[in-house]
Amino acid sequence: MIVRVNGRVASSRPIRGRHFSFRLLLPARDIEVGVTTWTRDGRRSSSVVRHVFGLPASSRPRFVAEREDGELQRKLRKLGRDFGGTAGLYVCSLTGGSGAAWNARARFPAASTLKLAIATAVLAGYQGIPPPGSSLHGLLVSMLTYSDNAAANALEIWLAGSTSAGASRVNALMRSIGMTDSEMYGGYEVRTLSGRIPVDVDDQPAFGYGKYTTASDLAKLLRAVWLASGGIGPLRRTQPGFTTADGRYLLWLLAHVRDAPKLDRVERGNRGVVVLHKGGWIDAARHDAGLVFWPGGLFVAGVMTWSSWGVGTSADVLAGRVATLALERLRQREG
């Protein structure tokens, strides 16, 4: 058997029998994997899998107990307090368990961050993976990678016949995995625009009615999707329709998000680091939440910001600083 990555031979070895397993380290980027086998009598069979995004082997889904990292907590608190507005921050290693939080249960206007929850509910309700070229795949790509509001509304309607009914389905899914501080409020306006980690409310934005969520809840959702990609966790338990393949498909979509650099600022100068994330913004709020993969493991990060006079790119800079701080600390602790 010969395995090729983007046309180049990555490995070859003899195999016996009709069934076998094979492990190969893949680069953390979009690739195409081809497999060719020959029998002793010269028969040949080949297959190519496109749209593969490699991730570090160290980040395979598994359960770990979370615990507060005192040093990380102090530094994260300072970042939150020094921000020129209200911030909610949460980070946790999903492969080692250490993490920290600041104002992580404060509710912020959710903006587009809950589009990830819409996608999760859609995949839980759809049998199989939406094939490339299908309308459902196109809507999911538009909603997540380009944050299109019309696509989000169309998917809520697909879920239950209307944006309000679809939002109820999304809320039910979020409650089922413990997201008790989040609310999907109808559709989107279509326009161009040691111990457990302490999760508290230190500064609550006053934003009135509408969609809301927290840094902690967004981290729960991302963690649940990551665990489901390995066939475990609350999504697999409470949403049987959300399969392992759904989890991997959703991670692939998040790997192709088009957005101004936020958490993914940490990729600069850090070889082997890749960020899968979903941001959101309105005039008064700017957020990002994602999974940060690095050669030693994986951590989840949620950064939410708000200011009554508006939030600009300083929020994006904050997200990058949070991710960089977490990466530097986890490299010390987990190697």
Image: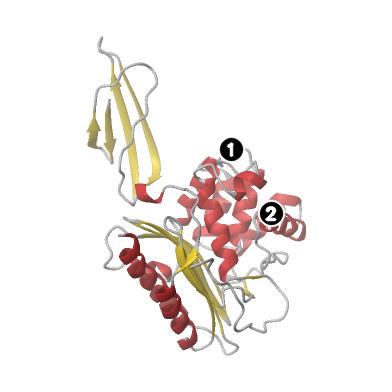
Q: Residues under labels 1 and 2: Cα distance? A: 21 Å
Measured as percent of width and height from the top left, residue 143 is found at 56, 59
Residue reaching furthest top?
41
> Callout 2: helix, strand or loop?
helix
Find numbered disc 1 in the image and state the secondary structure of the residue it sits on: loop
Q: Quadrant of the C terminus?
A: bottom left
On the picture, is 128 further left or further right than 333?
right
The number of numbered badges drawn on the structure is: 2
Name which residue lies at 47% across and 64% down. 92
Q: Which mark is first along the chain, 2 or 1?
A: 1
Colour mapping used in the image: secondary structure
Q: What's the mark number on residue 128?
A: 1
Label for residue 302? none
Indicate whether 120 appears above or below 278: above
Q: Nearer the viewer, mark 1 or mark 2?
A: 2
Q: Position of residue 172 (x, y in %)?
A: 72, 55
Left or right of residue 167: residue 193: left
The residue lying at 49 percent from left, 59 percent from top is: 145
Along the line of sight, the residue nearer the viewer: 138 or 108:
108
Residue 41, by quadrant, is: top left
* Residue 265 against residue 313 in the figure, above or below: above
For badge 2, the amino acid type reads Ser
Location of the N terminus by quadrant is top left
Residue 264 vertical position relative to residue 202 in the rendered view, above or below: above
Where is residue 85? Give x, y as percent: 53, 87
Residue furthest to the front in view is 194
- Mark 1 Cα-neighbour bin, 10 Å: few <14, some 14–19, many ≥20: few
Residue corresponding to mark 2:
176
In the image, is residue 295 above or below residue 4?
A: below
The residue that appears at 70% across and 50% down in the rendered structure is 159
Q: Amino acid at mark 1?
A: Gly
In terms of depth relative to the viewer, which is nearer, 159 or 334? 334
